[in-house]
Amino acid sequence: GFIDPGFSGHITLELSNVATLPILLYPGMKIGQLCLFRLSSPAEHPYGSEKYGSR
């Protein structure tokens, strides 16, 4: 998924094992990656703008 410019709030990582075998997770295990980028100019359509149907 994507986090839109201007978003303010909590980001949730939700995992679901759809396999038939259990998967063991342990503290410190690398399971994903999050990349955040600084914009060089303001977003044309920030989070919450009416452009994409936000109210």
Image (cartoon, rainbow, N blue to C red):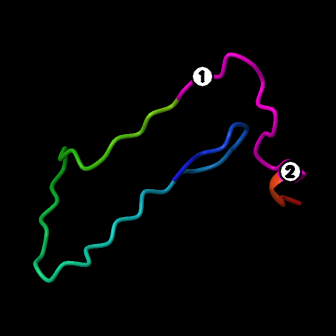
Q: State the image coordinates of residue 10 (x, y, percent, origin top left).
A: 58, 50
Identify whether 34 is placed above or below 40: below
Residue at x-position 51% and y-position 53%: 1
Residue picked out by circle 1? 38
Q: State the image coordinates of residue 8 (x, y, percent, origin top left).
A: 69, 44
Mark number, residue 51: 2
Indicate whether residue 39 is drawn in magenta: yes
Indicate whether residue 5 is drawn in magenta: no
Please identify the residue farthest to the bottom as the structure is shown.
20
Q: State the image coordinates of residue 53 (x, y, percent, origin top left).
A: 84, 60
User: Mark 1: which secondary structure?
Assistant: loop
Residue at x-position 17% and y-position 60%: 25
Instruction: Name the quadrant containing residue 7.
Output: top right
What segment is highlighted magenta in the picture? 37-51
Give the amino acid type for the residue marked by disc 2 in the picture.
Answer: Lys
Q: Is residue 44 left or right of residue 31?
A: right
Residue at x-position 25% and y-position 73%: 17
CA gap between label 1 and label 2 equals 22 Å
Crowdedness of circle 1 by 10 Å Cα count: few (<14), some, many (20+)? few
Q: Is residue 36 left or right of residue 54?
A: left
Q: How many marks?
A: 2
Q: Is residue 42 left or right of residue 14?
A: right
Q: Is residue 44 left or right of residue 38?
A: right
Residue at x-position 65% and y-position 48%: 9
Which quarter shows the C terminus?
A: bottom right
Give the amino acid type for the residue marked by disc 1 in the picture.
Answer: Arg
User: Mark 2: which secondary structure?
Assistant: helix
- Between disc 1 and disc 2, whose residue precedes? 1
